[in-house]
Amino acid sequence: MATARISILVATTFLSLLSGLLLPAKTALADAQAVPRDWHTEWPRTDFSRSAIPYSEILSGGPAKDGIPAIDRPEFISISAETGLAATEPVISVVIDGVARAYPLRILIWHEIVNDRLAGVPIAVTYCPLCDAAIVFDRRLDGRLLDFGTTGKLRYSDLVMYDRQTESWWQQFLGRAIVGTLTGSELTILPSRVEPVARFRDRHPDGKILIPPDPQARAYGENPYAGYDGSRTPFLYQGSLPANIAPMARVVAVGSTAWALSLVKARGEILTGDLRLRWHGGLNSALDTADITHGRDIGYVTV
């Protein structure tokens, strides 16, 4: 395959954003769209004359700009010294040039973005709880270094990020700028996986794991979206619902193709192009019970 972009996320969000995967990125001038007045007040540096999407598709998720604070100075400890996570708790693992780090969802669920540098590569580790999408990007774009924060806004129940250099807005799942100066630009997606912390420890005994910036500042380990797995639709979703799959079902997406996670589980493995997707048990959902440690086993996929 030309691209091994693999993600697990909520089916409804994937199908809603599918056109963004199939169509080339375009830089567009916004037509005569009404820009909410408070946007100009909160975002004076954002160029709202440039947009690739209708502004009516962007909704406030509740928090203001940076109300969900990104982590800009991440701190790590050796994975061998980590004792606070249950073996089946989910982490986003990233490996570059043999250097491995794990980013627990119990932390990302409260911060959504970590601006980091791994093996000399500037990366953004991102997680959107509302569509359960964990994606890692290279923060370099055309010779410019970007760092990211949260807008507090959603599109199809997916995180809308912004870069602090131009305050353009970015669709997290696509890694594409949808509003502002950089509209149409795309970030490079880096290989990553969501896996149990015990599996990361086995694979990378010399790896490191992210720790909270201030353990007392958030209820790390608790799920602020308790029961979300049982919701009928994604939060603040506006649009058509899929006809042949439950709206909140998780899917494994490879490019513009996706399979229900339950199907991968039932088959054990799926071959697609030169990739072999394998299902494994032993990964907690971070979006089930109030205590992430006790979340139901949803499993995970390796390639």
Image (cartoon, rainbow, N blue to C red):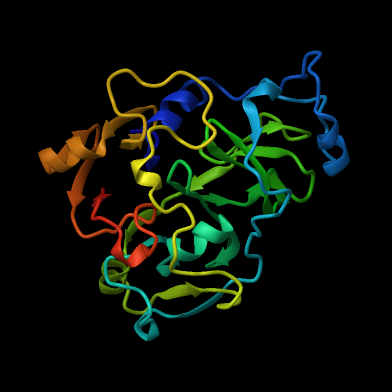
Q: Position of residue 154 (x, y in %)?
A: 60, 37
Q: Residue 256: which quarter of the image?
A: top left
| 30 relative to 296 in the view: left or right | right
The residue sitting at the left extreme is: 267
33 shown above or below 175:
above
Given residues 261 and 153, the one toward you in this image is: 153
Q: What's the residue at 45%, 18% (across, down)?
A: 240
Q: Residue 270: which quarter of the image?
A: top left
| 254 relative to 139 in the view: left or right | left
Q: What's the residue at 61%, 73% (across, down)?
A: 217
211 shown above or below 65:
below
Work out which quarter of the rendered image holds the N terminus and state it: top left
Q: Position of residue 274 (x, y in %)?
A: 24, 37
- The number of numbered discs placed on residues in the rendered structure image is 0
The residue sitting at the bottom extreme is: 81
Given residues 247 and 25, the one toward you in this image is: 247
Q: Where is residue 293 in the image (x, y as percent from the top left)?
A: 33, 67
152 shown above or below 213:
above
Q: What's the residue at 66%, 29% (across, down)?
A: 184
The residue sitting at the top extreme is: 32
131 shown above or below 298:
above
Residue 52 visible in the displayed image: no
Q: Position of residue 221 (x, y in %)?
A: 43, 68
Q: What's the residue at 38%, 56% (across, down)?
A: 286
| 122 relative to 285 in the view: left or right | right
Residue 11 visible in the displayed image: yes
Q: Residue 14: which quarter of the image?
A: top left
Given residues 31 and 120, the one toward you in this image is: 31
